[in-house]
Image (cartoon, rainbow, N blue to C red):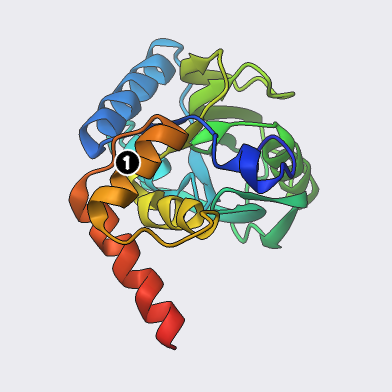
Amino acid sequence: MRLGDPPKERARAVPCELLTWGHFYQLARRLARQIREDRYQPEIIVAISRGGLIPARILSDHLDLFDLATVKIEHYHAVTKERSARVRYPLSADITNRRVLLVDDVSDSGDTFEVAIRHLLNQGRPQALRTAVLHHKRVSSYLPDYFVEEVIEWRWIIYPWAVIEDIGSFLLQMKQTPASVEEFALNMLQRHAVKVPRQVLEDVLALHKSAAVA
């Protein structure tokens, strides 16, 4: 978990916020406006994969910037935190003497950004390097240059592009697989304070059943 490696009883009580695609898009628009108003004009956007891929693509659209590259940093698998962040797939683009915008979905612990920035600076020396996220958690050791919302009371944010993965992880942490979608929904509401659409719960259960058969 992002709070370390708590026992399952604590894991099941993790508070969550489920973002819709519409909410995400409005956050991305506000983030793009913030960058424009600051008069920062990046020449290339680098998305931290996987969480930063979709935010970076929307920013490239709103900033009218065609050059978009990626670096994959592994730190979390769903809601499970690895011991340390590491570069899985390095940056292939040349950022030397260029204005760079490094994008992720959230600044959570700060480890991912620290590893990503160190990696970028080892790849080449940019003219400028700034960072942007949708959410900045106050507990993070890294403060991004641009963020839309500050998360003061810690919670797990479920982004729409990771909803099956995240909800599926919570399902695996339950002592028993819910007997119905209604039971699953009640578990998520009681243990994570989040109301999950029925379709999502159906898809998660279907995936879980197919994995069990395989």
**In this view of the protein, which residue sits in the foreground, 165 or 43?**
165
Q: Element at badge 1?
A: helix
User: In the rendered image of this protein, does residue 76 appear above or below residue 208?
Assistant: above
Q: Is residue 159 visible?
A: no
Q: Is residue 147 left or right of residue 113?
A: left
Residue at left offset 56%, top offset 15%: 153
Q: What residue type is labelled 1?
A: Leu
Residue at left offset 68%, top offset 41%: 112
| Mark count | 1
Residue 56's image quarter? top left
Q: Name the residue under label 1.
A: 186
Q: Where is residue 178 in the image (x, y as percent from the top left)?
A: 36, 58
Q: Position of residue 97 (x, y in %)?
A: 66, 38
Name the residue at the bottom extreme: 214
Q: Position of residue 28 (x, y in %)?
A: 34, 29
Q: Where is residue 22 in the image (x, y as percent from the top left)?
A: 21, 33
Residue 101's image quarter? top right
**In this view of the protein, which residue sits in the foreground, 206 or 181?**
181
How crowded is the residue under tag 1: few (<14 C-alpha within 10 Å), some, or many (20+)? some
Q: In this view, does 182 lie to the left or right of 73?
A: left
User: In the rendered image of this protein, does residue 45 appear above or below residue 89?
Assistant: above
Residue 11's image quarter? top right
**In this view of the protein, which residue sits in the foreground, 197 or 138?**
197
Q: In which quarter of the image is the N terminus?
A: top right
Q: Quadrant of the C terminus?
A: bottom left
Q: In this view, does 82 lie to the left or right of 56?
A: right
Residue at left offset 51%, top offset 60%: 172
**In this view of the protein, which residue sits in the foreground, 15 or 139?**
15
Residue at left offset 30%, top offset 50%: 183
Q: Is residue 135 visible?
A: yes
